[in-house]
Amino acid sequence: MVGPLEQAVLALMIFVIMLGMGASLTPRDFYLALKRPQGLAIGLISQYVFMPFIGFLLISFLPLTPAIAVGVLIMACMPGGTTSNMFTYFSKGNLALSVLMTVTATVFGVVLIPIILVLYASALDLRIPGENIIITLILLLVPVAIGMVLRRLNANAGAVTEFMGSVLALVFIAFLVVTWVPRNWQFLMETLPATYVAAIALGVLGIAIGYAFARVLRLHPRNARTVALETGIQNGPLAIAIIAFTFTGTEAQSYMAVPALYALFIVIISTLVTLIFRRANTAAEQKLPDGLL
Amino acid sequence: MADPDRPWTAFYGPDVRTEIEAPSYRNLPEMIRAVAKTYGAARAFTCCLPNGMNGTLSFTQIDEMSDALAVYLREVAGLAAGDRVALQMPNCLAFPVAAFAVLKAGCVLVNVNPLYTAEEMAKQFEDAEPHALIIVDMFADKIPQATSGHPIPNVIVTRVAEFFPVMPKGIVGLVQKYWDRSVKPVEVAHIRLPEALEAGRSHIAKDRVQVDLYHQAIASDDIAVLQYTGGTTGMPKGAMLTHGNLIVNMEQAMALMVGALDKGREVALTALPLYHIFAFTVNLLGFYWLGARNILIPNPRPISNLKRALENYKITWMSGVNTLFRALCHEHWFLDTPPKHLKFAGAGGMALQSAVAARWREITGAEVVQGYGLTETSPVLTFEPLGKPREGTIGIPLPSTDLACFAEDGARLPAGEIGELGARGPQVMKGYWQKPDETAKAMNGDWFLTGDIAVMDHDGYVRIVDRKKDLVVVSGFNVYPNEVEDVLAAHPAVREAAVIGVPDEATGEAVKAFIVSADPSLDTNAVRAFCRDHLTGYKVPKRVEFRDALPKSNVGKILRKDLRAEALTQTAAQTAAEPAAQAAAD
């Protein structure tokens, strides 16, 4: 679906965006997120317990073909990716927590994803492509680290990188939606309503349940927003890579329907959720009287 | 052995000089120049925006740039010694450059609150009659209306990101222009600050202008700054602060901290506006004098705007008001990472609540020290000696400062008796600009009467118990009820209005309006919106109450004191009711 040149451009964009995200962070942010690991633990539970279960419920109740159902399950088992970090940043969430959740979920995913899939779809034998996991981690951690160093060396270089990264992130989000629709027009027309429902509900329920779970366990709203986005937003490209690795030909095409649809709708859903989160953040801000300053 | 006339000197620390009568420099330009020579290439001012973008000027750069601008003001704009120059900007790098340039040019600096409405600016301009205005572009749209009564021949326009490196300056410019739309068109003839500096520099190079000649003749008794404060009649009054007043007060205030601070090594967070006398004297002058690096915050609202500055710089000292400390104590990021290097903080402008001070100490592990003063006293008069605060007091007088209470008839009262607080010392202003009657009313011999009703303990600690004037102090800013009442009276649906100050948890005091309305549909929001068109934010009534009638004396004068007494009983009843309600809920 995506050519090698486009893939390289996308990878470069993600690199620059993550450089910008990194430039908004300090080592203390990570230290604090690790010092209180309950946020991370809640996020991981939400990611690998609730999300697959949501996927399981969806395939149980929706009239889906077996291949589509497998696509839903695979998608539901994915860790978060850089997209979740981006939306956490724009939602004024806890970016350090988001990055840590992505990293731990991706690393644990190597073991957890096969186990969960066996649990919900006993016959499914998936191969997790190690190189994709490594690339995901590199594309996340290397630029974040460079961004942090940059900020440390020069606050202006950091702030400018962060600004550029966030502008590029907006372009990236718009680019995903705008190029996706015409390219997959035929596919959109042929897809059955139940598949749409599954692809959209996965993201919406993931975000809603992640948020509710985190709030019930009394996480700060900022961390709850992070867990919500991290839970609902999955690493779409990783799912596609896993499918491409495991299946071939037309079979692979139908397994990929949900991941592809999900990739489109999660961007739209997350954008709306981000707008809501930002508003909530502004509303929760302390009102300083006009007088002081 | 403590001076028997000044028993409070016994509480001064061992390093504190008890006498600071005469300034160590003849005038402010001399101080500015000497400090720049000492600290040279060290960083003097850094302006930090909420996103972390920043610009920095060294002591040498500040000195050179303010020289160039001083030459522009004198040679190109044609100003003479003693001419007023209005400065209207939030904290940014242009502030020290412009303020120091005005002083070096031998001119008089007039600080103007950038958030003022055009009407409020106009009143101040009519009184001060400035010959030049140095303003940040975000507020330039108000110039035509503000100067219609008193045209200002020279306008110099600058920007918040002035003197930033190219990239951040460009980004901030684009964001302000296209995203916030906070940059306003300048519809009057003007010059940009960098061009004015260039013009000044070329004059220095060509004509070998000696900047020092502009201020050589300035004595410590000459006016340096007209610092405006509201007037009881609604017209602003300019306190004439001399070079001597400001230098001495800076030295008096810094003397208290000398033991705890290292010259040339401190980093001060300046989130309070420099146009306010507290930050002007303590941060702009005092910390500059100490060779510190001032981190200037253009806008501390929302309070998360301080996050990057606190993360990126090792802040060792900060000045604030109760509102600011209180807000920081409620921010999750501040609680998570309180400034590690903070030695202590200075609070002024309004009473520091003891709960806030206690919480601050608990979070930061650093002391917060309260001072008290007024615009008319440059401003600091008292401070809490380190480690010896006394609950409910504003501390003890500064070195070479006398405080005493006076009876209605002007007689000085002995310690322990309640009266109007008077202050005497080298920091007391020269008088109000072109208002000898007002000056006479404020003085009792060489004592300046503060308008605060106070009582002094036998060893010198002062407690404020009440206020004589109808003044309301909102987060350190003075609001005169008359000015707000005048605006309210101009509303077609308002038949009568009275304004008082009521206790407020967030701001110390808040403005409350009582209105007799001619139109039953008039509501609080409409009243506040109308006020906002004519008054800067802090003067707008926070609370509005509609009444059928207002209490009046037999000659028909509205009795604010009756309204105040009512409001106080209400507050007391509420505070009493709260724990009861709490208990019921449990």
Image: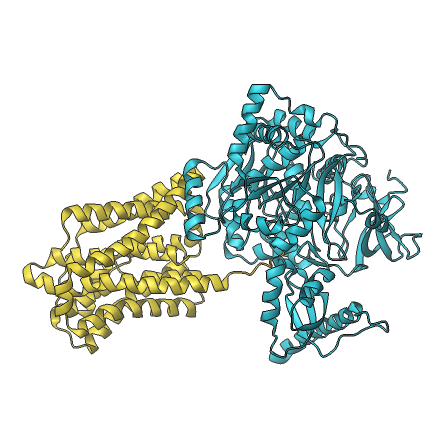
Residue at image position (93%, 52%) is B411
Viewer-nearest residue: B156 or B166: B156
Question: Could you tell me residue A73's position as x and y percent?
Answer: 20, 67
Question: Could you tell me residue A65's position as x and y percent?
Answer: 12, 73
Q: Is residue B96 above or below residue B333?
A: above
Question: Could you tell me residue B116's position as x and y percent?
Answer: 62, 53
- Classify residue B174 as left or right of residue A75: right
Chain displayed in yellow:
A
Q: Is residue B282 above or below residue B535?
A: above
Viewer-nearest residue: B393 or B321: B321
- Classify residue A194 as left or right of residue A247: right
Viewer-nearest residue: A262 or B142: B142
Q: Quadrant of residue A75?
A: bottom left
Question: Which quadrant, please, contains the N terminus of chain A?
Answer: bottom left
Residue at image position (76%, 75%) is B550
Q: Colour of chain B?
A: cyan
Q: Quadrant of residue B29?
A: top right
Question: How many numbered markers are drawn?
Answer: 0
- Classify residue B228 as left or right of residue B306: right
Question: Could you tell me residue B18's position as x and y percent?
Answer: 81, 37
